Amino acid sequence: MQERPVATDRRAALKARHRQAILDAADALIAERRDTRFSVDELAERADVSRRTVFNHFASLDDIVMSVCTQVLTGAVEEFRVAAAATPVGDGTRASLFAEVTLAMRGIDLPAVISYLCGVLGVDASTGRSHQAVQEVFTRATAQLADELEQRSATLDRLEIDLLVSSMMNGIAVIAQHWIAETGAALDDASREVWARLLDRMITSIRAGYAPVSHP
């Protein structure tokens, strides 16, 4: 009676290893070729799995590429966790949580992540594909970030947290598009200054909202 849970755990662990092997292989192929043009057979051989196993885990090569990009962004979310851990927890209100999020966001090297996505996804600022691709990757990481913030607030419900995170992540995807158009996704001091300026504008816009401004 005790063997079934052990067998289930082993199968789950094997599936997780295969999935990660496929992602690692895709990441290695992308790094070597500097593009995403590789076949399923090439990927399966590099990951040391069967073609069938690849499709047991992913619907298509595009799904694999997007998952690799999401994994890179997950690293940025981990940076957020580290930055958030160093940020004093506020009083749990929306304003306090927003301040904590924005402070941590400023400490993450998002230009490096977006530059990577730009190279992998073949982002072209003149096409709609760039926005859609970056948007999808950021959307995939939204739930992870919301889970992290939920642990930092005892007074806000999940809806409030999801709304805050969605606003931030969608905003970052939008300014990423503008950053790519303005800098070509280059990584240098000048481009990072552009990112800082765009991030400031996004934070100010979300913080202020769209309520009428009252004048004294």
Image: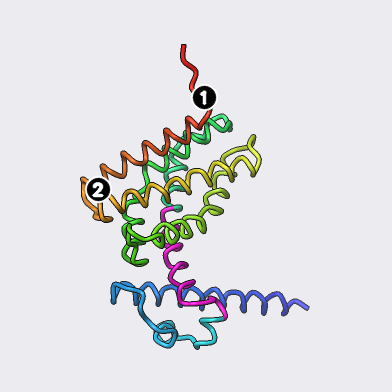
| Residue 212 badge | 1
Assign the N terminus to one quadrant of the image.
bottom right
- Which amino acid, by three-letter code, is at mark 1? Pro
Q: Which residues fall within the magenta stretch?
A: 56-76
Q: Secondary structure at mark 1?
A: loop
Q: Of 28 and 189, which appears nearest the observer?
A: 189
Q: Residue 191, labelled with which disc? A: 2
| Mark 2 residue type | Ser
Q: Residues within 10 Å of mark 1 (few under 14, many from 20)?
A: few
Q: Nearer the viewer, residue 162 or 2?
A: 162
Secondary structure of the residue carrying numbered label 2:
helix
Q: In the rendered structure, are the residues bearing label 2 and label 1 in contact, judged by CB atoms less than 8 Å apart?
A: no
Indicate the position of residue 41 as horizontal and vertical percent values: 43, 88
Residue under the point 59% across and 38% down: 153
Within-10-Å neighbours for mark 2: few <14, some 14–19, many 20+: some
Q: Residue 73: x, y in percent?
A: 43, 58
Mark 2, mark 1: which one is toward the viewer?
1
Q: Residue at x 33, y 58 (%)?
A: 126
Residue 132 lies within the magenta run:
no
Counting residues from the start of the chain, the first of labels 2 and 1 encountered is 2
